Amino acid sequence: MEAGSSKRPGGRSARVRDAVRQATLAELAEHGYAQLTVERVAERSGVHKTTVYRRWGSVEGLISDALELAKEEPWPIPDTGTVQGDLRGVVQLVRSGFADPELGPVSSAFVAAAMQSPEAARALHEFFVARHEQSAEVVRRAVARGELPDVVDVREVIRVAVAPVYYRLFVAHEPVSEQDADRAADAALAAARAGVL
Amino acid sequence: MEAGSSKRPGGRSARVRDAVRQATLAELAEHGYAQLTVERVAERSGVHKTTVYRRWGSVEGLISDALELAKEEPWPIPDTGTVQGDLRGVVQLVRSGFADPELGPVSSAFVAAAMQSPEAARALHEFFVARHEQSAEVVRRAVARGELPDVVDVREVIRVAVAPVYYRLFVAHEPVSEQDADRAADAALAAARAGVL
DNA sequence: CTCCAATCGCAACTGGTGTAGCTTTAGCCT
DNA sequence: AGGCTAAAGCTACACCAGTTGCGATTGGAG
């Protein structure tokens, strides 16, 4: 919790913080959330175990901290000229992110951690609020172009579009093909065109 | 793992198995997945700790076993006469299940456990395959009645309908209102009507 | 340049999860 | 009924995540 607003932002504390964050992401990418332990992160970062426990508290704390970072950096909203292209692009971005052998385990860890720790859940919620807001731009553009009727909730279109991908991955535990992703985007689009969103 | 096909199905083994299963569900309902431990289940069931470890192996094993049970019992597919009523009914069933103070934690535990243990993931996958198959009946009826055009994949309609509920609950960690659930069902219906599923 | 408060490193300790080896119980078969 | 064997019970303990108390170090204010 609030490991970024120390009283000594410019010295050893900062180095320690960065080392731990980097070690956390590396461990996550290599061994996944299930294997993630404070001791491994401490050893890998060269920071003492006690220090990590004091500043981050637990594995969930490490994840939450990493999430704060991830929330900051924006992601590339597609601009293909058509709603269908844009929406498909957004959903494919999600799909490919989890399929990536390096990013996948890290992103999955965020979802897993949020299911066990209220702290991580809050952080992940904030993350998705930001994501929805950014992604909804493709819907707003479509409405402005006259491609879609007035949409009640632009963020809902995004949710409906990406939800099937997450559902397959984390709930039903089914594989997600590119066709599946496109179909999910098309379904959300059809619903928006029909005026139900 | 296969705790149901013992060589002595009718005696003490069966009693032990039932006691442990019941204790698992009770613990899950009261304290949730995060607090679930083999020792508590053992103590509550009156079965010795080592016995539980031998037959179920771990917390994930207990969950997987409970899932096998849950998969068996069928659930009430709505039959309101219209696709919209039926689909909304299915999604509301999901929503209310997780909102229920007794069933909610147990169901959530299944999802959480599946994210950490491949064994539980497989069990949950099987569970959802069965659920999709059963729920898809409402779509088949609609096609037979001529309410929907020929649908390529009836199960996909179900997936798209329920996905937003799960997405809100377990990924974005947003509240899910009854309106949200209805809207998700309507969106899937619109997509099916448009012929994208 | 000096001091001091914050932070980190260290080693010993605690508590609880999971295991090993053995004994006892109870279901099933003749 | 009586024995045979699978399965449950029991004790002890090994192991590791997380804690604690204290001394060492560092960075910045004056």
Image (cartoon, coloured by chain):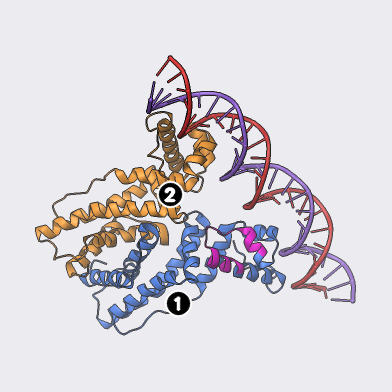
Chain colours: A orange, B blue, C red, D purple
Q: Secondary structure at mark 2?
A: helix
Q: Looking at the picture, which amino acid does disc 2 mark?
A: Ala
- Residue neighbourhood size for the residue with mark 2, other residues' Cα within 10 Å, grouped as few (<14), some (14–19), many (≥20): many
Magenta-colored segment: predominant secondary structure = helix
Which quadrant: the C terminus of chain A?
Answer: bottom left
Q: Which residue shows up at 33% across the image and 48% down it?
A: A97
Q: Which residue shows up at 21% across the image and 63% down it?
A: A189
Q: Is residue A134 visible?
A: yes
Mark 1 — residue? B75
Residue that extends furthest to the bottom in the rendered view of this protein: B81
Magenta span has B41? yes
Q: Looking at the picture, which amino acid does disc 1 mark?
A: Trp
**Front one among C30 and A103:** A103
Q: Is residue B136 visible?
A: no
Q: Which residues are magenta?
A: B23-43
Give the quarter of the image for residue D5. Answer: bottom right
Comparing labels 1 and 2, the label whose residue is closer to the camera: 2
Q: Could you say where residue B25 lies in the image, as x and y percent from the top left?
A: 56, 68
Q: Secondary structure at mark 1?
A: loop
Mark 2 — residue? A109
Give the quarter of the image for residue A102. Answer: top left
Q: Could you say where residue A176 lies in the image, as x and y percent from the top left?
A: 35, 56
Q: Could you say where residue B95 lies in the image, as x and y percent from the top left?
A: 39, 71
**Front one among B28 and B70:** B28
